[in-house]
Image (cartoon, helix red, strand yellow):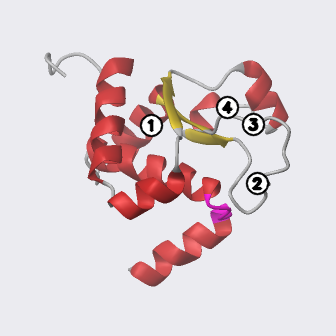
Amino acid sequence: MTDDSLAPSLDDLERLARKSWEALPAEFKALAGDVLIRIEDFADEKTLAEMEIEDPFELSGLYVGVDLTRQSISDPTPTQTMVFLYRRAILDEWIERGDIGLADLVSHVLVHEIGHHFGLSDEHMDRLLEEAD
């Protein structure tokens, strides 16, 4: 982010996500495996329709793949696991909240989506966060 008058770009968010990934414990990254991280402005129309989401600002991240609890060595072709971070929704939440740094929010969304890779539901992760407070 070079000019404070401009919104952080896709590349800026990718740098924040990579930095967040690198800061995670080695054991966590090893268990997560080869997760591809993609940054896009919004989820595409097909994804929003499948998730029954009308407002693209309501989706800040998405895990795509077979979570570890359902993977099998007998699967014919393993799918690439991916985490999508949606820049515009993240920026909107960041501005609306005003109580968290952008790097922290990107990290939170990234870890949340990787949590789905481990088979955790949104409800389970919410309970874990409540217990941590």
Of badges 2 and 4, nearer the viewer stands: 2
As shown in the figure, which amino acid type bears the numbered disc 4? Asp
Q: Which residues are magenta?
A: 118-122
**10 Å crowding of disc 1: few (<14), some (14-19), many (20+):** many
* Sequence-first tag of 2 and 4: 4
103 with respect to 17 (left or right): left
Provide the residue designation for mark 1: 90
Asked whether disc 2 touches disc 3, contact meaning CB atoms under 8 Å apart, the reply is: no
Whether residue 25 is visible to the viewer of this picture, yes or no, is: yes
Residue type indicated by callout 3: Ile
In the image, is residue 105 above or below residue 85? below
Callout 3 environment at 10 Å: few (<14), some (14 to 19), or many (20+)? some
Q: Are marks 3 and 1 in contact (CB under 8 Å)?
A: no
**Proximity of marks 2 and 4: CB atoms separated by less than 8 Å:** no
Residue picked out by circle 2: 71
Instruction: Return the disc, 3 or 1, that comes first in the chain's sequence.
Output: 3
Measured in 3D between alpha carbons, the distance from the residue under mark 2 to the one under mark 3, in whole angstroms, is: 27 Å
